[in-house]
Image: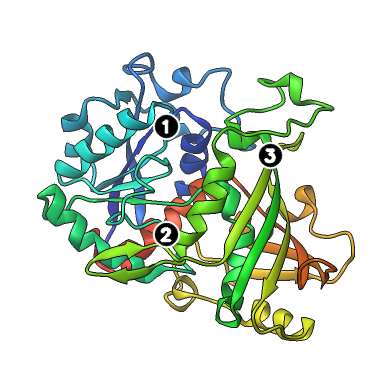
Amino acid sequence: MKEFRVGIVGATGMVGQRLITLLEGHPWFTVTTLAASARSAGLAYAEAVEGRWAMPTSIPPRIGEMKVLDAADVDTVASQVDFIFCAVNMKKDEIRALEETYAKKECPVMSNNSAHRGLPDVPMLIPELNPHHAAVIDTQRKRLGTKRGFVSVKSNCSIQSYVPALHPLLDLGVTKVLACTFQAISGAGKTFATWPEMQDNVIPYIGGEEEKSEQEPLKVWGRLEDGLIIPAQTPSITTQCIRVPVSDGHLAAVFFSLENKVSKEEILRRWKEFSGEPQTLKLPSAPEQFLRYFEEPDRPQTRPDRDLEKGMGISIGRLREDTQYDYKFVCLSHNTIRGAAGGNILMAELLAAKGYLD
């Protein structure tokens, strides 16, 4: 695989920081450019994030010395890279305009943002589940008038735990799903140092999260028709999303029913044997065992299990029959790795392997 020059737009935020740590030493992608808001532009990266670096490891020295560019200076940023990762904190219409501007400069965009997720010609990839959706990039390029540029997005972090667990069961006819997510504060870009009010506290509301959690799985499971993604009509999904005092790791309690109910053993077999294109292609960030089931009655737990497969695996436990639905289980994913930066990198690896970044 050729080596790619990579830019991170939104490099000073929580996801940008995580991208920096995960891309250090990557075999295909080398970070050559960092960009953020105008207030950080011109500063050395270490100075720009002084007092705000939230990762457990230190800033790589090479990165710390790198000068931060203005994300709005699209011509300069795009001229220095082969593609960008984008994780910015702006209004939705501003994000969409910024990402399209990069794409129209023939700079592909790997987006962690929600602005483009609803467009039928923008793939929203969980690489193990719907890699075939990358085909709509050809349609998108026609709309944008580009030869190389496009936008690809990753899904919301809240669905990264339960959608992969349900995916191997879809052919059994999953009819309805109830999911309650218990989401870490890093999903809001916070730490306990910057959000002390979250200590010993639970907030039963995360703005916009339930709508994303109910609608985005249907796009992931959608079909391709005339170069566009048509969202699935089933299953019906209802969710509640709750902020809990945990640093990293989104846990979900999930209930579901099937048209064709099977045994618990059959579900466990499907989880154990499931893999996707990232595993077949041996992509650098792909987990070896994507879905792991824990037999212990008190697993998965956020602190010991969120780093499974370097944060790229999905932990599942407590599968049992239910009185209102057919089955229920608990699942966990690392929200800033699989659910954000790591999932974004895996998406880029998949698109590189498929030739979309050439």
Q: Quadrant of the N terminus?
A: bottom left
* Precedes in sequence: disc 2 or disc 3: 2
Q: Which residue is mark 2?
A: 125
Element marked by disc 2: loop
Residue extending farthest top: 39
Rendered position, 279 above or below 334: below
Is residue 80 in sight in this rendering?
A: no
In percent of width and height, residue 352 lies at: 30, 62
Marks 2/3: CA–CA distance: 22 Å
Kindly indicate the quadrant of the structure image that contains residue 257.
bottom right
**Numbered disc in front, either 2 or 1:** 2
- Which residue occupies 33% across, 63% down? 229
Q: Which residue is mark 3?
A: 184
Identify which residue, 262 or 78, lies in the foreground. Answer: 262
Element marked by disc 3: loop
* Precedes in sequence: disc 2 or disc 1: 1
Q: Dot 3 surroundings within 10 Å: few (below 14), some, or many (20 or more)?
A: many
